[in-house]
Image: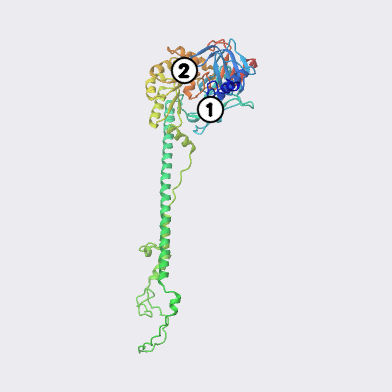
Amino acid sequence: MTFKQQRRVTRSGRGGNSRSGRLPAPAYFIVLLGTASVTASAHAQLFGLGGGETIEHARILTGDGRVIEQGGISIRGDRIGDVGADVKAGILGKSFDATGKTVTPGFIDVYSGLGIISGGGAANALSKAADGWDAYAADVFEDALRNGVTTVYVAPRGPVGVLGTSAIFSLGRPGGGRTGSAIKEDVALHVNLGSGQSALARINTFNNLRRQFREALEHRKSLEDYKADLEEYEKKIKERAEKKAKEEAEKAKSGGEKKEADPKPSEKKDEKPAEPKPDAPKPEGPRPGPRPGPPRPSPGGADGGADAPEDATGEAPSDEPVKVFRSLISGDDAPFADAPPATGAAGDAKKEEEIKKPAEPKPDRAKEVLLKALDRKLPVRIEAHRSEDILNALELAQEFNLDLILEGATEAYLVADEIAKAKAPVALGPAQRSELRADNEFRRHLATSAARLSRAGVRWAVGGGGGVQESRFVLANAQLTVGALETEGSPLELVTTRAARFLGLEGAGRVARGARADLIVWSGDPHDPSSVVERAYVGGKVVYEAKADK
């Protein structure tokens, strides 16, 4: 074999087919794309691309019961990029050394009054918690962050009845010295049955609430009637217009046919004019005498006893005009009682006026909010503490088919079976209360209320209790609640994953890839009373540091 032949064999692919050892073009593209993606991911992890920072060497409580004894959490924007034992900061990325510290999700208070300005006056369905948020209440916000709270559910404050719609706020700092931004607005319609009032006042509050819902339904009925009447009105107007157009078309058509029936002017020229007929002989008779003058009135007058003079025709003149004139002066309508109805153009115009456009009901925004609740597009969250008020709330929900959430519910354990039957979740307040008196709504408070609700199958969550500064005690309330539960569960889960599910917050209350980066760095275990918050992240940004607080 010559050298050239050997070279040809070598170039042929060592097997005779020059293409057998090559990848097709699509395969090259897939391999390159995969290599590029892996390389990009490796570079992002290696060099810390994508912004944010990485918390390293931390003990991580994920919020759903898992524990990573030592691991890292990467933050990308307002989300968690990755979490695990092998997550490290890149060469060029920022890192926070959390050796000996514990990281948890930020706490969620499902029943808070943090940052809400007290309202006054009558209750109003149009009030919004988002409008009453005091973004410059720096002290109360920092106090909440210092205790691990990053998210709160708040409702408008006011007297009793319908108070408006609630909202969920995160305690981030958007800038300008402000704190807090609404994650969700119009979360639920908030109602207070006024359990602290007298029995008669509570009955009046409940009856007024029922009346408002009924009036909202009547408002809807008036809108539906108006819509139907408007459609009927438009239908009649259309029919009248079509009828009028048809009549005009027929009139135009008949006029054209009549014109065609007449002879043309050219045809009339050939016709001879008719010859005049000879005059008929006039009848002979006496010549007319002198023209009679006006008749003289008789001695008896118009209504006198003498005969009335005859006119030129030989008949007595009618006295009807005189009677009509006297009736007009006296105001008597008798001469016109038997007058026939108006006809012609005037009658047709009167008939046209009978089709009147229906009057549109006045808009009522407050009733529109109530209608959203009646359509179950807006949950109704009712604060009620006494067992009688709780039963009234359940009755109201059944009557109007409301999506009910009970709030406070101090005596819920007394009617737990009824609550379970209605499938109404409960947002509980403080596990311990100091303001217990024999005549107030908290007189039958029990720390074991949550345990009894659990046994009855009621879904519940625990919050701070609706006060301005009670959010800082949300973990303590959870610890006291779990202590009386006699079931498995941790206080941390109550104020993180369970609270997020209760409020319908997806991607919150847990440490996981893609979850919202609301994180708390503790000096030790958060269940240890000696542990303090050293750093708080909200939406991936540091909003609190203990060293800045000293």
- Residue at the front extreme? 1
Residue at numbered disc 1: 26
Rendered residue at 46%/45% (across/down): 360
**Where is residue 2, by image quadrant?**
top right
Crowding around mark 1 (Cα neighbors within 10 Å: few <14, some 14 to 19, many 20+) is: few
Q: Which mark is residue 121?
A: none
Residue kind at label 1, given as amino acid type: Pro
Rendered residue at 41%/24% (across/down): 424
Label whose residue precedes the other's in the sequence (1 or 2): 1
Colour logic: rainbow
Q: Quadrant of the N terminus?
A: top right
Crowding around mark 2 (Cα neighbors within 10 Å: few <14, some 14 to 19, many 20+) is: few
Q: Position of residue 535 (x, y in %)?
A: 60, 16
Q: Left or right of 472: which side holds 367?
A: left
Q: Please count the marks in the image.
A: 2
Can you see residue 534?
A: no
Q: Left or right of 262: which side holds 39?
A: right
Q: Left or right of 548: which side holds 402?
A: left
Q: Position of residue 227 (x, y in %)?
A: 43, 44
User: Helix, strand or loop at disc 1?
Assistant: helix
Q: Nearer the viewer, residue 162 or 369?
A: 369
Disc 1 from disc 2: Cα separation:
79 Å
User: Marks 1 and 2: which is nearer the front?
Assistant: 1
Residue at numbered disc 2: 437
**Where is residue 206, by image quadrant?**
top left
Q: Position of residue 133 (x, y in %)?
A: 56, 28
